[in-house]
Amino acid sequence: MPVDPAILGAFIITASALVASPGPDTVLIVRYAISSGHRVGLAAVLGVQLGLLVHTALAVAGISVIIASSPVLFKGVALTGAAYLAWLGIQGFRGSGAMGLDTAPENISGAKALRNALLTNLLNPKVILIFLALLPNFIDATKVNVSAQLLTLAGSLIVINVLWQAPIAWLAVTVRHWLSDPVISKVISRATGGVLLIFAALMVYDNIW
């Protein structure tokens, strides 16, 4: 197995907290599913996953180059990822947690939903930093199979995304009410924020000592 089971488990927990935290991908999926039906919502889910595949390809090339060129630079990138993770965790304890789902866009086609979701994911700074700064924290740079490790982690992230976003697209009306509830949304934000802060601290510890 390219990634040690313990490391993979830690990544799955961290990635699950990131995916469950409110973000533009989830909001877009919910809005499209509500306005145009669950099939269009699922098309948006597919668009998000295609975006993740592009990020994966870029990460495999970029992170491999960083590891090959400078272990010190690699550690710096990993610490940047930990800092960003901590920032996301802090955001979970701020604000009301509302996701802003009061309005919905006009009826659109599945192709347009897929395209818009793809572009939203590709241009999402959160996703970019997950791949370029977070994944190195779960990579063993001493092994030669860096690309295989990245593909395993990215594949796990895509599976987590689908397991979270596909049911949301299918049950959009019910989930919309659930996610729009300030109390429930705040609980989700703070719970995932706490998980992210814990893992950020562990990553800093691993990369300093």
Image: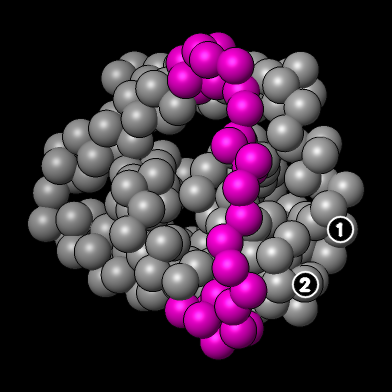
Residue found 60% across the figure and 35% down from its top:
99
Q: CA distance from mark 2 to mark 1?
A: 10 Å
The answer to whether residue 93 is magenta is yes
Residue 139: give x, y in percent of width and height.
43, 49
Using the image, determine if residue 7 lies above or below residue 164.
Answer: above
Mark positioned earlier in the residue sequence (2 or 1): 2
User: Few, some or many C-alpha atoms within 10 Å of disc 1 (few <14, some 14-19, many ≥20)?
Assistant: some
User: Few, some or many C-alpha atoms within 10 Å of disc 2 (few <14, some 14-19, many ≥20)?
Assistant: many
Q: Which residue is mark 2?
A: 37
Residue found 41% across the figure and 62% down from its top:
120
- Answer yes or no: is residue 50 visible: no
Residue 77: give x, y in percent of width and height.
24, 40
What are the residue bounds of the magenta stretch?
89-115
Quarter of the rendering containing residue 126? top left
Secondary structure of the residue carrying numbered label 1: loop
Screen quadrant of the C terminus: top left
Amino acid type, label 1: Leu
Using the image, determine if residue 7 lies above or below residue 169.
Answer: above
Screen quadrant of the N terminus: bottom right
Amino acid type, label 2: Gly
Q: Which residue is mark 1?
A: 171
Residue found 77% across the figure and 45% down from its top:
176
- Answer yes or no: is residue 34 visible: yes
Q: Is residue 64 left or right of residue 164?
A: left
User: In front: 149, or 124?
Assistant: 124
